[in-house]
Amino acid sequence: MPAAVGTIETLGFPGVLAAADAMVKAAAVTLVKYNVNESGRFMVSVRGPISEVKVAVDAGVEAVGKTYGAELTDYYIIPNPNENVVKVLPIDYSSKVERFRIF
């Protein structure tokens, strides 16, 4: 079954922490990537079935909005990334996250 990818980017660490926590609590998704971007921006990515990723991203966006001082800079969902994209970008299930994989 193809796994969708959902990513949230925030300005400041508290927002990305709140987003990541809300995403994994709200839906059956696996956190696959956390990254520090430039200028104080942070991003977090999850994978799972498209219906679960949609719920997770919505919960993450809501959590960022409720976090004092946090600012949502961007978010997106890719329903069925091409195999080439999965192999090149760091969004695949790594050995670090494999034990947390839901499906």
Image (cartoon, rainbow, N blue to C red):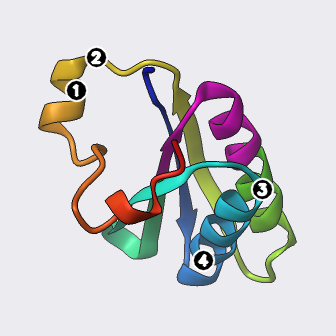
Q: Which mark is residue 82?
A: 2
Distance between mark 3 and mark 4 Cα atoms: 14 Å
Q: Secondary structure at mark 4?
A: helix
Which badge, 2 or 4, is on the more N-terminal residue? 4
Which badge, 3 or 4, is on the more N-terminal residue? 4
Q: Report whether 22 appears left or right of 103.
A: right
| Residue ID for mark 4 | 17
Distance between mark 2 and mark 1 Cα atoms: 5 Å
Q: State the residue in front, 48 or 38.
A: 48
> Residue flagged by tag 2: what amino acid is it?
Asn
| Residue ID for mark 3 | 26
Quarter of the picture containing the N terminus is top left
Residue in the image at 80% along x and 77% along y = 67
Q: Which residues are magenta?
A: 46-57
Give the vertical position of 78 relative to 61 (above or below). above
Q: Report whether 100 appears left or right of 90.
A: right
Which badge, 3 or 2, is on the more N-terminal residue? 3
Give the vertical position of 56 relative to 12 (above or below). above
Q: Do labels 4 and 1 touch, CB within 8 Å?
A: no
Distance between mark 3 and mark 2 Cα atoms: 26 Å
Marks 3, 4: nearer the viewer: 3
Q: Quick one: label 3, few (<14), some, or many (20+) residues within 10 Å?
A: some
Q: Do labels 1 and 3 touch, CB within 8 Å?
A: no
| Residue ID for mark 1 | 85
x and y percent of residue 16 in the render?
58, 70
x and y percent of residue 77 in the render?
55, 31
x and y percent of residue 83 in the render?
22, 20
The picture quadrant where one finds residue 42 is: bottom left
Residue in the image at 54% along x and 50% along y = 102
> Residue flagged by tag 4: what amino acid is it?
Leu
x and y percent of residue 74 in the render?
57, 46
